[in-house]
Structure formats: C-alpha cells, structure tokens
Image: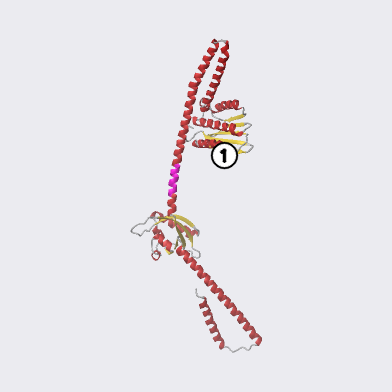
Amino acid sequence: MPTSGAQIERLRRKAEAYLRESAHTPPIDQSATETAQLVHELRVHHVALRLQCEELRQTHLELEESRNRYVELYESIPVGYFSLNPRGAICDVNPAGAAMLHQPMNRLVGRRFHLFMPIAQRRRFIEFCKHVCFERKRLSCEVDLGDASDDQPRALMNVLLEGSPAQGQKDIMRLAVIDITRRKEAEQQLKVHEDELRTSRQKLQDLNAQLLNIQDEERRAIARELHDNCCQQLAMMMFSVNSIERCCDEPLTHKVRMLNEQIKRTLESVRHIAYGLHPAMWDTMGVEEAMRSYLKDFIEVTELPVDFHAIDVPRRVPEVISTRLFRTLQEMLHNVVKYAQASRVEVRLIKNENTLSLYVTDHGRGFHVKTMKQSPRGLGLVSLKERAQLLNGTLNVTSQIGVGTMVHVILPLTSGNDHPM
C-alpha cells in the first residue's frame, strides 16, 4: 500500500499537469464575483483534500499497528498455525507450528501436513480436511504428530486440531494445532488413579460385607446359645423351684414364689435379648408374619401405635434380604422411640416387580435432613444406607419439622451381592 506522502506527491504532480494544460486554453472572461466564488470553491476543495489526506494517514497508521499486532501474535503464540491448500500442502506456518514439526519454516512450505502423523491416522485427517473445506464449517479432531522424515524418530505428540475455512479464500484451510500431550498424560494418570480407587472401594465394600456377615453370624451364635443354654437352664430352675414350692412349708412358699417370678422375668429378658440379636422366626415364619410378630411385641413394650400394611410380599425371600429388613426396621423403630416423640408409626412392606420396599413413617417432630450426619440418629441412617448399597439397594430419608420422617428402603430380591448382611 503506498504511503500517504507518496499519495500527496502523486496528486501534486497530477495538479501541475492539469495547470500546464490549462495554460494553453484561452482565458475566460470572468467577473470578480465568479472569480471569488471559484477561489472559495478551490479553498474548500483544498481543505477537503487535506482532511482526506489526514484520514488516509490515520487509517494507514492503524493498519500498520493492526498488522504489527497480528504478526506478533502469529509468530509468538505457542499454538501452531498452518495454512493448507486442498491437497493438504502447507502454504504458510508460524514459528510455533514449525517447532512442533521440528523443521525450519522454509522447508515446510509445500510439504503435505499428513506426512507428519502416523500412517494409521492419515486417512482420517484427509477426511477431516475435506469436511472443513467442502462443508465450510469449523471442526476439530485429535491426532498424533511426529517427524516422519527424521532418521531418529521422536516421541509422538498428542495434538488437538482446529480446522476452519479461510475467509475470502475458498481453497485454503486454516489449521490451529494445540499440544495436549500433558493433558493426555494427566488424563491417563487420572484414569489409573480412578481405577485404583475403584478397586480399593470395591475391596473396602467386600471387607465391610464380610465384617457384617461375621457380625450377623456372631449374633446368630449368641442368640442360639442364649436360647439353647441359658433359657433352658432358667426353665429347669423354674421347674425345680415349682417342685420346692410344693414341698416347702407355708412360711417359705411366699419367698419361693417371688424367686419363681424373678426367674420368669429373667427368662423373658434373655429371650428378648436373643430375639434382638437374631429372631429365628424371620427364617421360619416368612418376612410378613415375622414383621407382624415383631411389631406386636414392639407395641406391647413401647405402647406406641403402629399401623402395618403388606402388599404382595412373598413368603420366602433370600435370607440376606430378610436379615437386612429386620435390621433396618429395628434401627428405624429404635430411632422413633429415642428421637421422634411420635404419636404413631406407619410401616408398609410392598413388593414391586423384582424389589421389596419398606416404608417406616413416624408422625413426630422431624428434623433437618442436611444436618442428619451430625447427630447420632444420622450416623445410624448413614450406616443403614451403606448396608443397603452393598445389596445394590437404596435408602432415602425425607423429613419435615413438626410433621414427621419417612425412611424408604428398596432392596432387589435378586441381589448381585451374595454377602449376608
């Protein structure tokens, strides 16, 4: 583009030539008024020319500044920029792009870009270029780069290609090349750590399931020992005391009866403890009947009204499911008595396709679910939730202050986890 000074010089020479031609033209007789008008117009035209020259000079300076910024950005940015023709040959490249290909800039012009990537990826890149040029839209893809002509092959570089059609140049494609090698390495390391974490979590779940299995077996053994040993011995003591009562004198009869009542209360306490550890009826009577019996005893002890409804519950369910339901119901009713100050409780047991749902709803004071983990009640619920997850189940809690709380447990009847809970 000519400079503003050159433009002014060209206009001056044109004006001088015009004046020389005008010197051979016969003078025109003009009045003073017309002469003054002509001079005024010339002055106005002169001022307009000066303003135009100033505008041209300012525009030229802005263009120069914009060009300098573009050149600085193009040459200094750490992103490789390439201009490719329809054959994929390099028409232009910035220093960062040449550095990525480990070649001088002048040796890259004319060479086809896909020769710097593995053979297996070249066809995909050619298709990528066709889509960008023919569809006239911006596209991106990921490839590996390496100098194919180097006698000592370099490690491949993972790059992200951003292709777009050049504005005003139909057959030219602009290609931005971004090095994502470190990002890929970080993603790979993250994937390895995630796999390790997933494996550790699975091992932890397996250990937790084994621990719960051992706890349940211990409870079952202790309950059996209490029933078969302690309860039997207490029963024999009652028989012995009854025999003594029939043989003793009247003054001792009252004391013997008191001892008999004490033994009877102790026997009931031991039976209650054994039932809390592991109720045998849950293995023999079926879930629905066992739950009804348990709730009947709960009502007698706590005097808290409980409404129980069961829908389509099968008589026989896997032992791991029945045990989990018992532990959940036991914990929920314990929380109701200890924290809820409820007027009544509703318990629903429903079979839906291949799942069994337990709802325990209390009409009590309620609490804030978000702060649940900070209370002892919340810790028990969190533990039950984790145990339900070990059986591929779920546990959800909803509560409202002054209204009450509902705990909903869903357990699949065909659990993918065989560990007893």
Residue 24 placed where, x, y %?
Answer: 56, 89
> Quick one: 106 or 189, which is closer to the camera?
189
Query: Which residues are the magenta region?
Result: 188-198
Give the left or right position of residue 331, taking residue 187 as reference: right
Q: Which quarter of the picture shows residue 263?
A: top right
The answer to whether residue 419 is seen in the rendering is no
Assess disc 1: are there few (<14), some (14-19) or many (≥20) residues with their C-alpha within 10 Å of its C-alpha. Answer: some
> Quick one: 101 or 397, which is closer to the camera?
397
On whether residue 48 falls in the magenta region, the answer is no
> Quick one: 17 or 203, which is closer to the camera?
203
Name the residue at the right extreme: 33
Residue 103 placed where, x, y %?
Answer: 38, 62
Q: Is residue 60 above or below residue 181?
A: below
Mark 1 residue type: Met
> How are the residues colored?
secondary structure
Name the residue at the left extreme: 151
Give the left or right position of residue 157, taking residue 319 as reference: left
- For the point 54% across and 14% down, the residue is 242
Q: Main secondary structure of the magenta part?
A: helix
Q: Is residue 327 above or below residue 57?
A: above
Mark 1, secondary structure of its residue:
helix
On whether residue 194 falls in the magenta region, the answer is yes
Residue 134 placed where, x, y %?
Answer: 48, 59
- For the point 40% across and 61% down, the residue is 99
- For the point 48% across and 27% down, the residue is 220
Residue at the spot of label 1: 372
- For the point 44% across and 44% down, the residue is 195
Residue 12 placed where, x, y %?
Answer: 53, 81
